[in-house]
Amino acid sequence: MIRPLVAVLLLASTPAAAQDAPPDLSGFWGPVFDFGEPAPDMLAKLPPDTVLVEDTGVVEFPRGEYGGLELTEEALARAESWQPEDEFALERVCLPPSIIYALQGPFPFEIHQTDELIVIRNEYFDQVRLVFMDGREAPEGYPHSKMGFSTGHWEGDELVIETSHIAVSTITNNGLDHSDQVRMIERYRVDETTGRLVATQWFSDPRMLANNGARWIEWELREGEHVYPYECDPSFALEYSASAPE
């Protein structure tokens, strides 16, 4: 009877937070391109009227293809006037995209996790995200930026991040832009079978989209690797202009 009693006392003295500690996602996560099937239970948590946009990784849609996203008149007019060579103008070639597009790209990131703050350091354009885990809200007048304002919480083994205050940028790499009204919700967890970090990225923008979009993304943990400086050099835009056909 002594040993069971000791076990009960030890369990009772352990803080609840320690018993229910969330998973540690810290580390270097590299993109993978041989995706498994999206987890049905994670897809089931996506809001209604959401289409799964399959452009994750190196996939790029041709002009006029938006993966099932339904564009408003404003968004369609902008997309139809878009020219790919505009992206290689000297003033635009090193302009970073927002997290809406950057998240799905073929670049790694590092996660540094604490109870109150999660820092996500992206290699793509040296972008850094701060995810506040302490329940705070965006201060009045908080400015829009490419990374936005992110708050997070845990739902069991899933990290849920909601991001607002995102500056105007691209959704797909063929002229479809989002407005500064866009909102994004991500869900992350480690797959028990593969050990991969998997996520759904959901976004909504009533000004530019008549429905909602989502992506399924996967990464693998790579021990001993680190994020490298991106250091975009705009001079390659001049090389592109010189080699472009007349």
Image (tube, rainbow, N blue to C red):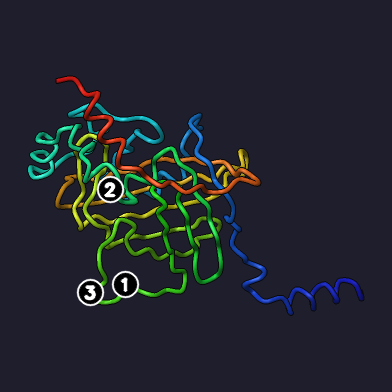
What's the CA distance linking mark 3 and mark 2?
Answer: 24 Å
Say whether residue 50 is left or right of residue 29.
Answer: left
Mark linked to residue 69: none
Residue type pointed to by label 1: Ala
Looking at marks 2 and 1 on the same chain, the residue that comes earlier in the sequence is marked by 2
Occupied quadrant, residue 17: bottom right
Residue 77 drawn at (x, y percent)? 8, 39
Which residue is tagged 1? 138
Disc 3 packing (10 Å; few <14; some 14–19; many ≥20): few
Q: Amino acid at mark 3?
A: Gly
Mark yes or no: residue 200 visible.
no
* Mark in front: 2 vs 1: 2
Residue position for label 2: 95
Answer whether labels 2 and 1 touch (C-beta < 8 Å): no
Relative vertical location of residue 24 with respect to residue 198 in this rendering, above or below: below
Who's the residue at 60% across and 45% down the image? 225
- 60, 201: nearer the viewer: 60
Identity of the residue furthest to the right in this view: 2
Residue 216 appears in the picture as rendered: yes
- SS of the residue under disc 1: loop
Res 141 label: 3
